[in-house]
Image (tube, helix red, strand yellow):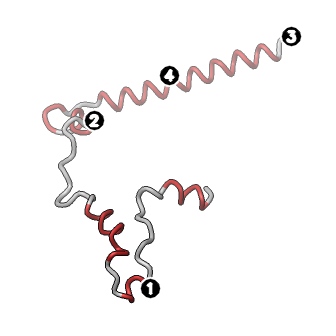
Amino acid sequence: MHASLVRRQLGGLVPPKVATPSILSSGQGAGLAPLVQFYSKLPKGPAPPPSAFSIKERYFNGKNASGKPVLALIFGLFGIGYTIDYNMHLKYHKNHAH
C-alpha cells in the first residue's frame, strides 16, 4: 500500500499534530486546545466486557460447547470449492469440444 493511502486511513485514529515545539516552549496554552479537546472525548476507564453474543461464547464456551461452526466452515469451504471446480470443468469442456 502507498504511504498516502495508509496516512488517509489512519487519519481518523491519529490526532492532528497541534503540539509543535514553538507552541510548547512559548508557554501558550491556547494552542493546545484542539489536542485537549480530542483527548477529552476519548473513553476513560476499563474496557467494556466482550459481548455475550459472540460466536465464541455461543458455540465454544460453557454448556453450549459444540463443533457446529467448525463443521459449517468445512462444508462451506467444500461447497465453494466444488462450485468453482465444477464451473472450471464446464468451461474446459465448452472450449475443448471435439
Looking at this view, name the residue that lies furthest to the bottom.
25
- Answer with mark 2 or mark 1, whichever residue precedes in sequence: 1
Mark 1 highlights which residue? 22
Task: Check disc 1: other Cα within 10 Å, few if <14, some if 14-19, many if 20+.
Answer: few
Task: Check disc 2: other Cα within 10 Å, few if <14, some if 14-19, many if 20+.
Answer: few
Q: Three-letter amino acid code at disc 2? A: Ile
Mark 2 highlights which residue? 55
Tell which tag, 4 or 2, sits nearer the viewer: 2
Please give the name of the residue rendered at 40% of the width and 64% of the height, measured from the top-left corner: 15
Percent x, y of residue 79: 50, 22
Indicate the quadrant containing the C terminus: top left, top right, bottom left or bottom right.
top right
Identify the secondary structure beneath mark 1: helix
Front position in the image: 97 or 42: 42
Label placed on residue 5: none
Please give the name of the residue rendered at 47% of the width and 58% of the height, measured from the top-left corner: 11
Depicted 85 relative to depicted 9: above or below: above
Tell which tag, 4 or 3, sits nearer the viewer: 4
